[in-house]
């Protein structure tokens, strides 16, 4: 009897191999040949799942976003005080451990790669700004923010902080580790929430 193959699981395994290749060799090393070798597949087998390199890269990028989104949705649906939920959600957007640092590295590589493509790039593709805006609205509705607060300005500051922490942790991991990222974010939020 032929072995049953879970095609979606195989696609995820190929995407994870893509992340490893990008992490080790950068986007220039993310060739179909290198990804197939990392996934333990022939080129033909890999092309069975993804007909083009861009299709593979787009799927891999989408999977990073889906996994982070799933973690965030689990936090949002759980119990907890509003300030703690907001903090926990924002901590999912910054690299506080090796898994999230790898995701950030891959995400930045994908973003730079697709930015110069005619199709497939949108500056808001990651959804982070809109998520932060929703979190700020939630914090405001829960009475966590000062009434005179300039919501637009504070949303922009928080967005810049999240992106900045992610970028610096990626570029300077020896200086900015996960504990420091978390400490900086928690300190900012303690001042923001009264």
Image (cartoon, rainbow, N blue to C red):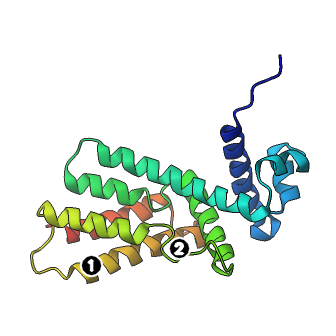
Q: Residue furthest top?
A: 1
Above or below 44: residue 174: below
Residue at image mark 2: 168
User: Mark 1: which secondary structure?
Assistant: helix
Label 2 environment density (alpha carbons within 10 Å; few <14, some 14–19, many ≥20): some
- Please name whichever residue, 63 or 150, is drawn nearer the observer in this view of the structure: 63
The correct choice, above or below, for 29 with respect to 2 in the image is: below
For image coordinates 30% across by 44% down, the residue present is: 77
Q: Is residue 36 left or right of residue 123?
A: right
Quadrant of image for the N terminus: top right
Quadrant that contains the C terminus: bottom left
Q: Is residue 21 left or right of residue 168?
A: right
In percent of width and height, residue 17 lies at 74, 50
The image quarter containing residue 115 is bottom right
The answer to which of marks 1 and 2 sits earlier in the sequence is 1
Question: In the image, is residue 159 above or below residue 89?
Answer: below
Q: Is residue 121 left or right of residue 193?
A: right
The picture places residue 108, in percent across and down from the top left corner, at 60, 70
Residue sitting at 37 percent across and 60 percent down? 90
Q: Where in the figure is residue 48, as x and y percent of width and height?
A: 82, 47
Closer to the eye: label 1 or 2: 1
- Identify which residue is drawn at 34% across, 68% down: 132
Q: Write down the quadrant of residue 172 in the picture.
A: bottom right
Residue 8 sits in which quadrant? top right
Against 51, is 11 above or below? above
Question: From where the camera sits, is residue 118 visible?
Answer: yes
Depth check: give the residue in front, 119 or 164.
Answer: 119
Residue 86 appears at what percent x and percent y?
28, 57
Residue drawn at (74%, 31%), measured in percent from left and top? 5
Reading the image, the residue beneath label 1 is 154
* Res. 184 in view: no
Q: CA distance from mark 1 to mark 2?
A: 21 Å
């Amino acid at each position: 009897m032929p072995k049953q193959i879970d095609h979606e699981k195989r696609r995820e395994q190929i995407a994870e191999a893509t992340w490893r290749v990008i992490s080790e060799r950068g986007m220039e090393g993310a060739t179909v040949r290198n990804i197939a070798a990392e996934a333990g597949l022939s080129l033909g087998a890999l092309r069975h799942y993804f007909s083009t390199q861009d299709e593979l890269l787009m799927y891999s990028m989408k999977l990073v976003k889906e996994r982070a989104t799933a973690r965030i949705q689990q936090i949002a649906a759980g119990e907890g005080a509003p300030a703690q939920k907001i903090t926990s959600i924002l901590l999912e957007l910054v690299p506080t451990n090796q898994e999230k640092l790898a995701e950030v590295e891959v995400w930045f590589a994908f973003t730079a790669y697709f930015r110069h493509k005619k199709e497939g790039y949108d500056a808001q593709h990651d959804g982070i700004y809109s998520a932060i805006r929703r979190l700020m609205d939630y914090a405001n509705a829960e009475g966590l923010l000062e009434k005179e607060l300039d919501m637009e300005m504070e949303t922009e500051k928080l967005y810049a902080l999240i992106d900045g922490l992610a970028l610096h942790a990626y570029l300077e991991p020896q200086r900015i580790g996960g504990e420091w990222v978390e400490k900086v974010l928690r300190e900012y939020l303690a001042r923001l929430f009264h």
